[in-house]
Each structure stands twice: as structure tokens, then as C-alpha cells.
Image (cartoon, rainbow, N blue to C red):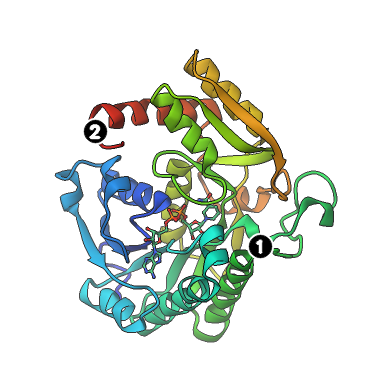
Amino acid sequence: MSDDRRQPVILVTGAMGCVGAWALYHLVQRGLTAVSFDLSDNRSRLDLLLSRDEQQAITFVQGDLTDYAQVNAAFQNYHITHVIHLAALQVPFCRANPVLGAQVNVVGTVNIFEAARQNGVRHIAHASSVAIYGPAERYPTGLIAPDAPPDPTTLYGVYKVADEGIARVYWQDYGVSSIGLRPYTIYGLGRDQGLTSEPTKAMLAAAARRSYHISFGGVMQFQYASDVAQQFIDAALMPADGAPVFNLGGPPTPVETVADIIRRLRPGVEITVGDQRLPFPIGFDDTPLRQQFATVYETPLEVGIEQTLNRFECALREGLLA
Ligand SMILES: NC(=O)c1ccc[n+]([C@@H]2O[C@H](COP(=O)([O-])OP(=O)(O)OC[C@H]3O[C@@H](n4cnc5c(N)ncnc54)[C@H](O)[C@@H]3O)[C@@H](O)[C@H]2O)c1
């Protein structure tokens, strides 16, 4: 059983992914004990953020979230006290393999909540997504209200709605509390897959002095992976009553503005933006997030892009990226 007086031991699922790698980075920076749990043992995203020496502070577990016995063993073997549950298959992967998508994104979430319950872990931070909402035309214009009804149009979004329901019932029936966060478009080092990864791919191209075409335009909220990871850490460490879920916010920004910033910061690189519009609202009202959290991490877009370009250039020089 976990003991609230012990030093936190924080399990990060999906830790080899983009947000996961940033979560490990910030946990190490904060001197907190991190246990990485991922199906993959490919540390290439983490290598962009921490040297192998620095990574020695982390315990790495290669495990499959869909297998309850493996999840439970991780909780038991490493005396987990806190959880940041990020592992998931993103939209294209759920579309390509709906059964595996459900196993990872839904059964995997049940496995995490159940292992927490069985091992006396009382609180979980977990990743939902704004993909639980429907297309813009189904809502009033402007920012989507925090209490707007879910209306997902992808299996991924449906699975995330299920995850929020799982969290709610684990509180109601077993007293396991949770905080869910719903990011929109995450950018930054390590964002190399998923529907909205192209703005970050444009940053990598610019760092390599190559041109890049972002295939979609439109307006969306961009959230820096570093900020998102910090918000998840705070969510995991913050006691909560219930199972609230919060939209992450930020200024609604045209994709063209991201291209402009990249072009301004790295003159001479050609970044273009296509006409296609993704069927998403321009943004989500984050008032409840601001009421719940003492700190909302919100690096200005220009600063986040500049840091990303600098870090990509450094990684390219060091041969960490092709
Ligand atoms: N990236 C975004 O813009 C965005 C937006 C909204 C929500 N989210 C959510 O935030 C979370 C983190 O996103 P990300 O961009 O870091 O994702 P990512 O795709 O970079 O990483 C996902 C990680 O999950 C791991 N994983 C997959 N199947 C697994 C399994 N069976 N067992 C253990 N690990 C497994 C993968 O190996 C990978 O390392 C996800 O839940 C995602 O749905 C992301």
C-alpha cells in the first residue's frame, strides 16, 4: 500500500512518447523519483532532453499497458505512490487498428485505475484530449465552453470519453481520485507523430535549413510539450476530490502564424501552409484549469518555437536526429 508520507515515486506511462519524455525531464529536474513504463524501449525522444548520465536517475520498465499483470507488477515492484498516465495510441493509429486502439486507450486506462486501487494509490493524473469534442459547427462560435457536451467524431475521441468515464466511476465506486487534462495541439521536441505533429516537423525542417509544407491551416491552440508535461506533474501531485477533467487553453492561433514565427526566427527557410482545415474548434475555454491550479504553464508561442529550434539544432549537431 502506498503511504502518503513517503517520498513520491511517480509512474509515467507512455514515457517514451513526446509528453512522457518531457515529464521524465521535469521530474528529474525537480529531483523527484520517476519510473518509466512503456511498451517501447526506444529512448530517442528522451535522449533529446537528458544525457544518458542524467537518465540514470530514472527506473525504466518495458511493459505492456494492456496486460494487467504487468501493470500491477510495476506498481508493486517499484512501490508507486503517484501516476501520470499518458500512454495511448493517437488518432491515426486508432483509425488503422481500432481493436488495438481500444485495448491500449480504454483497457489500458482501466488497468491503471485498477492497479492503483489494488495498491492503495489514491490519485491519478491522466491524459484525455480535446478530441472528445465534435467539429466547430456543432457548438456556438468562439471558445468552446468548459461544460460543452462531448461529441467525438473519431474512435480516439470516443476512447478518451470512455477514459473520462472510467475515472469518474473509479472515484464514485472506489474513491480513487483523478485529474484529467485535455491538450489540443502539442508542439516541441519529441512531437514527431500524430495528426497535428506537422508544425513541429516544420520546426525540425527549419533547424536543418530545409523547406517544409504544413498540409493544414486554420486556427488552433498550441501548447508547448514542456508546459503540458509540467501541468501533468502538478496534476499528479495535487490531491483532488472527484475526477475533474480540464481543457488546456492558450490563445487561438492560425497555423500561418506558426509558419511566420519560424520564418522570422530562421530567415531564408521556406515554410508554407496548405488550405485544408482540420474539423476542430478554434479553441477551448480554460477558466476551470486556472481556478484549480496555482500555476498554469504557458510559455509564449514565440519563445517555445525559439527553444524548439535551438534544441533541434543542437540535437542535429550532436547526431541525435537524422
Ligand atoms: N500530442 C498531442 O498533441 C496530444 C493532444 C491531445 C492529447 N494527447 C494525449 O496526451 C498523451 C501523450 O501524448 P504524446 O504526444 O506524448 O503521445 P506519443 O504517441 O508520443 O506517445 C505515446 C506512448 O505510449 C506508448 N504506448 C503505446 N502503447 C503502449 C502499451 N500497450 N503499453 C505501454 N506503452 C504504450 C508508446 O510506445 C509511446 O511511447 C496521450 O494520451 C495522447 O492521447 C496528445
- Helix, strand or loop at label 2? It is loop
Tally of numbered discs: 2
- The residue depicted at 52 percent of the width and 47 percent of the height is 294
- The residue depicted at 42 percent of the width and 50 percent of the height is 19
Amino acid residing under circle 2 = Gly
Amino acid residing under circle 1 = Ile
On screen, 45 above or below 126?
above
- Residue 154 on image: x %, y %: 65, 64
The residue pinned by badge 2 equals: 319
The residue pinned by badge 1 equals: 132
Which of the 4 image quarters holds residue 313?
top left
Q: Nearer the viewer, residue 212 or 294?
A: 212
Can residue 8 be seen by looking at this rendering?
A: no
Label 2 CB-ligand 1 distance < 8 A: no
Can residue 188 be seen by looking at this rendering?
A: yes
On screen, 205 above or below 27?
above
Of the two numbered discs 2 and 1 in the rendering, the one whose residue sits closer to the viewer: 2
Left or right side of 46 for 203: right
On residue 33, the disc is none
Left or right side of 176 for 7: left
- Residue 129 on image: x %, y %: 59, 58
- Residue 41 on image: x %, y %: 26, 59
Q: Nearer the viewer, residue 74 or 18?
A: 18
- The residue depicted at 54 percent of the width and 20 percent of the height is 270
- Helix, strand or loop at label 1? It is helix
- The residue depicted at 27 percent of the width and 55 percent of the height is 42
Q: Earlier in the sequence, mark 2 or mark 1?
A: 1
Query: Which quadrant of the frame does ligand 1 lie within?
Result: bottom left
Query: Are discs 2 and 1 less than 8 Å apart at CB?
Result: no
